[in-house]
Image (cartoon, rainbow, N blue to C red):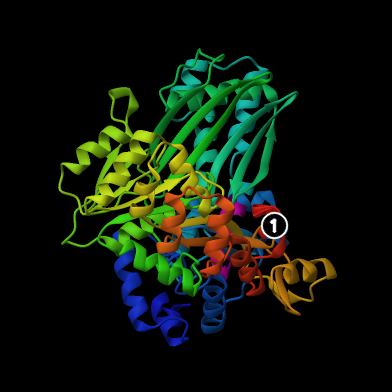
Amino acid sequence: MSSARKRIGDLLVEAGVITEVQLQQALVQQRETRTKLGDVLISSGYITQQQFIEALEFQLGIPHVQLYRQKIDPKIIQLIPQKLADQHCVMPIRMDGNKLMLAMADPLDYFAIDEVRIATGLRVEPVIASKDELVRAITRYYGLQDTIEQISQNLQLKDLDEEHAIQDEDSPVVKTVNQIIVQAVQLGASDIHLDPQDGSFRIRYRVDGVMRTERTLPTNMHAIIAARIKIMANLNVAERRLPQDGRVELDIDFRKVDVRISTLPTIHGEKIVIRVLDLGSSLADISRLAFSERNEEIFRKSIEMAHGVVLITGPTGSGKSTTLYSSLAHLNRDDVNIITVEDPVEYQLEGINQVHVNPHTGLTFARGLRAILRQDPNIIMVGEIRDTETAEISIRAAMTGHLVLSTLHTNNAVNSITRLIDMGVEPFLVSSSVHCIVAQRLVRRVCGHCSQPYTPIDKELEMLAEHGFKTDRLYKGVGCAECGRTGYKGRLAIHEVLVIDNGLRSMIIDKRSDNEYYEHALRQGMVPIMQDGLQKAVEGLTTITEVFRVLGHGD
């Protein structure tokens, strides 16, 4: 290894995987975020995790292992403390004499190798494993098991001081809750569900929009874990008959994470849902929001206009906030004043004035919006148009020379027109102020590590033909360690972009039906969201099954 002491970035440039410019940009971001260079390169989209592993394997001659195929002796795990494994993302695999095989995401992390050598007294032989697989393995082999067993024993022996257990940072209950949240962040989960059942207690994560059960615990552990979560969010521990909501900001792996907690009484106890928002996550450039070429061009022109309303629509969890924030990041310049009013502030953007709605103090969307208009803004972002007052103020702000970006909860783009009118906004105000409406959903992306082509079956060919597509090849993930053997990794958006042209403005003033709006939009070239999704399936980005799972057969 001593002969190979090169920087990981230099190796990747030599291998032609990244350019020198990309390396320098990543190094700047690495210094700002204090994360590993490989993680920065992957999160920035310069390389995939598989490219990273293959380049290191080829350049260094270090073998790559798939941890899910390894049988690891629990005694080997005990050689390295969990703190060390977490800190450096390493995993002991097996021992041969005085030699320890160590799986690492970064085999050039000599500091980590030295720490493991000192801690174990063994000679370390590194092998390469993906970071995602290492995180899962560390969680599985170290993870929650020790603390869960401690809680279970204490409950059986009736040797558990509840007040101490839910407040002392060193207690197994506190450690268990912390590990549940940390694991969710590491897996990229958006929500954690703690579900009390008849005779059991499930912990489930929503990853890439799909729920999965992580583990099932004894039902007697539910009350103490629920109490700890309530303490974190300053909720009433004694109140178990009424729903409660709270939030707390945590530091996890040098990142700010906003945790929103909701409790709901059920017949088996309180169901708790924890929404996880990574406040430090980097925003995607508009070019990486998965817009088609046509839709991206329309959207860019719309948000770069001096005034008017641009709406993003879709159900909860459809990526509306990401699209909004990416738009703000694109528009953020020294010569414009951008102010937002949000509930909650999900991403903190430097140079933008962000206002957090607080109904308890009387700071509603409408009141905040009125105050913003006295702050000489160029661009206003309203987190969500929920009521008539907010809608009217937003519309009138657009008509007085401001660009307004906001969201609505509607099924498709044309529904938003009727929704605004139903809220009490005059049709002539809608027609003269709204420029563009984007409807979107999120579908799971085919795993880039195990994607394989296949010949479509007759049913898939019929579905494609019904929407004007013809192909003899589609793609699906066969399942691997990188995607947890699901065949999917990550998500991308599918869109429907509606432009309010002169013909549509006249129809809005006449209060025509949604069907008439829709037919007119199709004649003007709008691509329905179903077609956009199927196009991305044909391109191998997602699957037909996934598109129909998200949209159903009616959109």
Residue 441 % position (x, y):
56, 55
Viewer-closest of 437 and 455: 437
99 relative position to 244: left or right: right
Viewer-proximal residue among 92 and 266: 266
Outermost front residue = 510
Is residue 20 located in the magenta-colored stretch of the structure? no
Residue linked to disc 1: 548
Q: Which residues are magenta?
A: 123-138
Q: Quadrant of residue 183?
A: top right
Residue 23, above or below 42: below
Visible in this render: residue 250? yes
Q: Is residue 86 left or right of residue 31?
A: right
The residue under the point 36% across, 40% down is 391
Q: How crowded is the residue under tag 1: few (<14 C-alpha within 10 Å), some, or many (20+)?
A: some
Q: Residue at x 53, y 47 (%)?
A: 317
Decide if residue 40 is on the left or right side of residue 152.
left
Amino acid type of the residue that numbered disc 1 sits on in the rendered structure: Phe
Q: Quadrant of residue 201?
A: top right
Query: Residue 356: where, in percent of width, then height?
Result: 30, 37
Foreground pick, 208 / 34? 208
Residue at the spot 62% in from the left edge and 66% down from the top edge: 531
Q: Secondary structure at mark 1?
A: helix
